[in-house]
Amino acid sequence: MSFLNKKVLNFTHSPFGLDLSDLSVKVVQLEREGKKDKIVSFGTSAIPIGSIVDGEIMKKENVISAIKEAVKKAGPKKIRTKKVICSLPETKAFLRIISIPKMEQEEIKEAIKWEMEANIPLPIDQVYYDWQMLEKKLSKEANKIDILVVAVAKKVVDQFVEVLELSGLAVEGLEIESIAQTRSFLDERDDKKTTLIIDLGDRRTSFSISTGTIPCFTCSIPLSAQSMTDAISKGLSISFEEAEKTKLTYGIGSAVKSDPIFQAVKPVLENLVSELEKSIDFYLTGLQYSASIDQIIICGGGANAKGIIPYLSQRMSKTIELGNPWVSVHIGSKLPLIDRNKSVQYSTAIGLALKGIYYEDLS
């Protein structure tokens, strides 16, 4: 099972990207025409709460129905292929960069196995893992090669493959969310920057740090867009539904006026800032793959909350920008079919769709 490099060439239709998260399915299909990319189709459908919990599928039929619905109603053109590249949940994945002495290819495979056993909290026979040698040297250890390794529990992978196949789809590849987002947001030509991507989702927030386009560090925390809604609900003594409407209308409220909405969500935001600072410190002082964080990008449904980007920028003393998931999609002068605010929610699906049209089969 290849997570990094799986690609089958010469389809009549390119495989589409499918982002399967706890609360929604998002699909995107791209095709290449000459030197330009074409957005063929996109769509989304909701997954009933409790059907997927923290990346584990609890109610298969609900998930299958949501997948079929997303594919069926996707537009402007119908998705004609059954071939799909699907995301795997970040919370169930282990991404590491390991350094090993230079050796022959067969010896590398065995060395990686030993390193995996030492670096992941699951027995090696309970995970699928994949690896890729890095051309760019990141570690400071001389006479060693750096290898990007990804592992995901077999139980999770098998669940995802099962529901995709029961939905009538043919699985051509699987990839963790952070790698797909890195492909979506970061331009390969700009390989000297270190970028932090904040994915503020409905159920969790994930951080990934990449040097160039190489993801080096990932983590997930339970703070989320829903955490802000819960805080507004409790702080203003209103229902969750009313709190969600309030958040959509007023965002995080006014930090300057310190209004009731802001006072309610401030503890959540401060916890988010604290976790960001811890992750950045660990990356810079612990891993030491880069000397600084050069840019910060935010995406996910929570990124659209009014006021959150300027507030986090001020608290972090760094410019934070809404991600542009079209930087690697060559659509020329045409505007994307999905507007900027909505497209950040499709970033994982766009990255998966890009994998379908651009990446050679190296496995």
Image (tube, grey):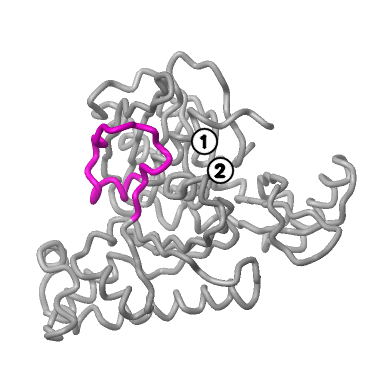
Query: Does the magenta portion include 60?
Result: no
Label 2, secondary structure: give it.
Answer: helix
| Quadrant (top left, top right, bottom left, bottom right) of the C terminus | top right
Q: Which mark is residue 195?
A: none
Confirm or deny contact between disc 2 and disc 1 (CB under 8 A). yes
| Quadrant (top left, top right, bottom left, bottom right) of the N terminus | top right
Measuring 33% from the left and 22% from the top, which residue is drawn there? 79
Q: Residues within 10 Å of mark 2 (few under 14, many from 20)?
A: some
Identify the residue position indicated by label 1 in the image.
161
Which quadrant would residue 259 be assigned to in this image?
bottom left
Q: Which residues are magenta?
A: 323-346
Which quadrant would residue 360 be assigned to in this image?
top right
Q: Is residue 346 left or right of residue 177?
A: left
Relative to 105, does residue 120 appear above or below in the rendering? below
- Distance from disc 2 to disc 1, alpha carbons, whole Å, reads 6 Å
Amino acid at pointer 1: Val
- Rendering coords of residue 197 (x, y %): 44, 60
- Rendering coords of residue 207 (x, y %): 47, 64
Amino acid at pointer 2: Val
